[in-house]
Amino acid sequence: MATRHQTTLARLMVAPSVLLLLGWMIVPLGMTLWFSFQSYNLLSPGMERFIGFLNYEYFLSDPAFWTSMRNTLMLVGGVLVITVGGGIALALLLDQPMRGQGMVRILVIAPFFIMPTVSALVWKNMFMNPVNGLFAWMAKAVGAQPIDFLAEAPLMSIILIVSWQWLPFATLILLTALQSLDSEQMEAAEMDGAGAFSKFTYLVLPHLSRAITVVILIETIFLLSVFAEILVTTNGGPGYQSTNLTFLVYSQALLQFDVGGASAGGIVAVILANIVAIFLMRMIGKTLE
Amino acid sequence: MSMMWRALMGACAVTAMGAPVLAETLTIATVNNGDMIRMQRMTSSFTEANPDIQLEWVTLEENVLRQRVTTDIATRGGQYDIVTVGNYEVPIWAAQDWLLPLEDMGEEYDAEDILPPIAAGLSRDGQLFAAPFYGESAMIMYRTDLMEAAGLEMPERPTWDFVFDAARKMTDRPNEIYGICLRGKAGWGENMAFLTSMAHSYGAAWFDAEWKPQFDGEAWNRALSDYVAVMNEAGPPGASSNGFNENLALFQTGKCGMWIDATVAASFVSNPDDSTVADKVGYALAPEGEKPAMWLWAWTLAIPSSTQSPDAAKKFVAWATSKAYAEEIAAADGWANVPPGTRTSLYENPEYQEAAPFAQTTLDSIMSADLANPTTVEVPYIGTQWVGIPEFQAIGTTVGQQFSAALAGQATVEQALQMAQQIAEREMTRAGYPK
Amino acid sequence: MARNVSETRRWTVTFIAWGIALVIFFPILWTILTSFKSEADAIASPPKFLFFDWTTRNYSEVQARSPYFRHFSNSVVISIGSTLLGLLIAIPAAWSMAFQPAKRTKDLLMWMLSTKMMPAAGVLIPIYLLFRSWGLLDTRLGITVVLMLINLPIITWMLYTYFREIPGEILEAARMDGASLKNEILYVLTPMAVPGIASTLLLNVILAWNEAFWTLNLTTSQAAPLTTFIASYSSPEGLFYAKLSAASTMAIAPILILGWFSQKQLVRGLTFGAVK
């Protein structure tokens, strides 16, 4: 057992960092909360005043709000399905013996290092552009009408771009988890005559469940605040079809310069994020303990 | 631990050092347009004449630039000594005392030479608050060969009906020739610039005298319906993501029959180095409905009142918008590349007239723009392809999203207009209009 | 016979895996190839894959427009500085959370993570005002501190997961032997946690390198990293795919190379205790 003295010392040593952490969480949050009750537009200075919950009323009744909620969920859900599903498939494939596995891994992991801005620019201009993009050329080559991805399926296109960035992450974590699977167990299962499918459902999948949970948790945190990809490709449009919550708050803050409204939006987003966090917490609690 | 400490302290020290502060470093925020990039290349002549002034360039894409500059100016952050702003912002910002008046620009400067419609839009109480770097109006650029093949002749100023008819006749989809290219990308400075100008010419207005939005009116419906119809029949695929740059690329690669857009585009489409159709471009004035479509835009250089170096900044602004600068560009890159649309003297210069076949059309377009009377009815605002209130950026962009959706076929014209009306009413109420 | 089957299978797997890997990598490859083309070749239809006139002109033109090496060194200082600073603060915090957990430690961690989901744009103006009054706008110090704070929840959480994997008995044994707290952290905990710390460091350098909201909004020129450099190309004027590609390649190359060289370490720790 640690002595009482040591415990106190430990607490003291740790206190500054914990306090700093909490401070960072609380100060901007507090400021945002304060501004969210103010009428404060950057473009009309000197008109700031307390307006109660009006900012929240406007934000929640904004026709874009529910659309953006739906889009946020679809974006997160879509990317999660693609990356987790694709990640499992890829991990199973890469786990097989093959030539040049190291090189394959290097190629697969690469998108994870790319700046979101850059990947959005590249996809938008060089692939999805309906006139000069590679996809348009491929469509024309087989005699089809090129699809204007960002106008006809804006959210799908963004899901595709974001999935491309996160697939390597999921693949690598799942692959590492897969490699730690006991080969003796697998062999024993084979001896018992288990087919590939039942091996997968009864052996591999349960073994991966922890890794899958971690992938979902980490990705959710980043996917809820996807922003650069939308800004660069569709600007949230057409209409509100690719506006997520983060982008909606951005447009309030930096297109309308409505600091009060954006703050209210920020607070709403944090509350929603916490609901998601509680949900995740439950899930993690079950799988990780 | 000590290793780590050392590494950390090292990192902190490097971090804290920052950059040396020089007495006269001018930070210039500008947009990534061709003319501005050329200005950046030309600055050696300025720094040679002013060795005590150093220039830092911050070149950004238009929307990012606007967002950065507005944040900084409104919070008086003092990050920029010179900012590139549009003539839409200038009167609004000048009214907030965010910009320094441009007095004493030097004897050579000749402020009288600036084209009157442009100067008027940048002044308050007769005092200039920003110096125009280039000015533009809108015109029709068209392919003379395709027009001929369609058996038509472009009048000096066509009607909208003529333009739509010609667009349909010029279209040849199998060969990737689209009769008309127009802006469709959502944004107050993108599709809404064109649509505002077009709707004004149809007799529509953004607001009536009580600041009530007018999207439920019949004129807007006609304008938007015509736009969507012609773009569907004769426009390029993916038009709802096309802005100025995308259309420029389409036109230069020979895929557009007509393109109605900013007059500055003329010098790009007529440049044989970039454009495959340089020798087949004709120019006409913007179409006419109940009133000619008007358009007046200027990218200007202004000095935020939070600058530390107002005198040096003024020197630079005077240099970059002077007659001498135009001559320097002419000497280096030819007259066709001189920033157009700001000075009378440029349009009186025979060398320029010869090098720029679009000069007269540009000048006529600019001179015919009337910021105060853009449409057939009385309006409480100024602006031809924008509306001069701070809220316009936000409302314009959101409405632009709706119209872009209508173009993409994801909403009907009626739905888009209804949404637009709803959004505009909401935002105007929120902003406290009528003021 | 069995050998033959497995050999065939091995080649099939190799073939499929390489195919998929190349598809995933293709956008990056295409960007790099395009950066060496002339603007006309860049949009040529049908596309030119390898047989075009290779040129480095785009790189020199991009360099002429903005000083690459300043942006590059800013990116290096900011991403590494913020990560090291973050580790310095997070290691003791994570240590205490892992070994002296209070009742609500996990809730606290979750809540910290959830603040990461707050849209940055919502807090920009308050932070901008603070930065202006403290003179931190466009300083490397300012942006380093902000990025450190942004990534702090992730750093703390990652370290917490690693530390929790360390059996408490070892620590207690060390204490029994009379190790001081300093020694306990230094000689017992740190060596066991090195893989975790290394991968936390790598992941956060990558995240900080690619962060594009705060870096763009809180820096102007002196402290501006590569994300600002790329921002001036974010709407290609005319059809400048080749220049866009050159700028993109310059912005991603350093972190891509770092990532490739350190991928083993990154992956080893990246499993967040998910592998038992």
Image (tube, coloured by chain):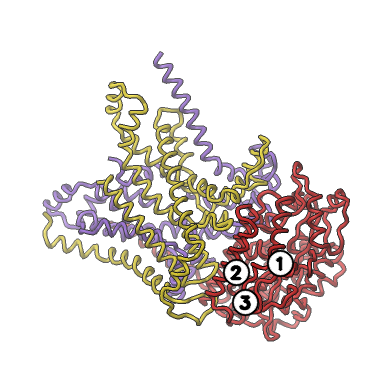
Chain colours: A yellow, B red, C purple
Compared with B100, B249 (above or below) is above
Residue located beneath label 2 in the image: B393
**Mark 1 touches mark 2? (CB < 8 Å):** no
Q: Residue at x 43, y 79 (%)?
A: A50
Q: Residue at x 50, y 35 (%)?
A: C20
Q: Residue A95 sits in which quadrant? A: top left
- Nearest the camera: C169 or B370? B370
Q: Residue C33 sits in which quadrant? A: top right
Residue located beneath label 1 in the image: B219
Q: Tell me the subunit letter for badge 2.
A: B
Task: Provide residue B152's location: percent of width, then percent of height.
Answer: 87, 54
Q: Tell me the subunit letter for badge 1.
A: B
- Left or right: C139, with A148 as reference point: left
Does mark 2 fall on the same chain as mark 3? Answer: yes
Q: Tell me the subunit letter for badge 3.
A: B
Q: Amino acid at mark 1?
A: Ala
Residue located beneath label 3 in the image: B211
